[in-house]
Amino acid sequence: MTRVLVVDDEPQIRRALRTSLEAHGYEVATVGTGEEGVVGAAEQAPDLVLLDLGLPDIDGTEVIRRVRAFSEVPVIVLSVREAQSDKVAALDAGADDYVTKPFGMEELLARARAAMRRKQPDASTEPLLRFDGLEVDLPKRLVTLDGDQVKLTPTEYGLLEALVTNPGKLLTHQWLLRKVWGQGYGTETTYLRTYVRTLRKKLGDDAQAPALIVTEPGVGYRWVAETTA
């Protein structure tokens, strides 16, 4: 049974999440402080952490940093904070996703499934990834669309590789820039947008109804396509 640790200082939120998650077959533990959340993540080895940022003792972003020191458990932030700076800080600290309160339970469950799929041992290490007509051969650094080779620059391929090997994860502008361009980059968001736009065009991804890359305004990008056999 999938184990979920809920870290939230509001008793009603903890009760609601426990009831809903258990109804969907999850095993749920709840705590009300950040320190308890760090200890719970270490001792209970959950499969997923749902974390509020506004905790009474330490901020949720610090909880993420501490958990990331010893665990790669998927962490989804649940918070009333809507500022882009809060979202970016949590994601850069190591959160896998960010959901603003109030939220729909079906959306949260879908985000949870995506985050846990990404953490499965072979989720991002398959040598050949297929997304309907799109194929990405990681060892050969070869991309084809409906059987035809897609000619990508090294930077475009690096961006695509970063996205497809982190499926479902919200990747911030800063993370992508440093991952693809290097540690000296982090603020060139216009530069990144240009490359994403070009990559979408080459992959046939409609920016108005994207099936591959979704833009999270002001925060980053998410690869949403599901792998196919």
Image (cartoon, helix red, strand yellow):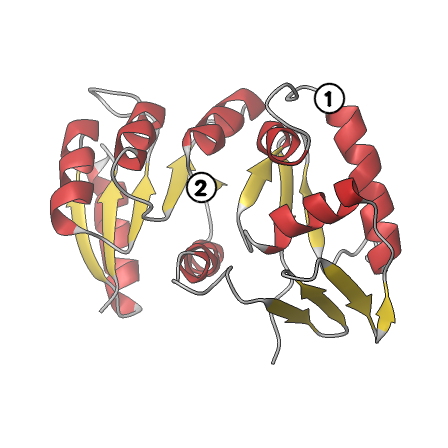
Quadrant the N terminus occupies = bottom left
Q: In front here: 122 or 142? A: 142
Vertical relation: 76 (above or below) 205: above
Instruction: Please say if the residues under marks 1 and 2 sit with CB atoms less than 8 Å apart.
Output: no
What kind of element bears circle 1? loop
User: From the viewer's perspective, is 45 left or right of 188?
Assistant: left
Pointer 1: what residue? Answer: 188
Spot the residue most to the front: 140
Task: Give the answer, above or below, for where 148 lies relative to 59.
Answer: below
Can you tell which quarter of the image residue 154 is in?
Answer: top right
Q: Quadrant of the C terminus?
A: bottom right
Q: Would you name the residue on which mark 2 appears?
A: 102
Residue drawn at x 44%, y 41% as measured from the top left:
102
Say which label, 1 or 2, has the lower sequence index.
Answer: 2
* Percent position of residue 200, x then y: 82, 51
Residue at the (62%, 76%) spot, across then down: 228
Mark closer to the observer (1, 2):
1
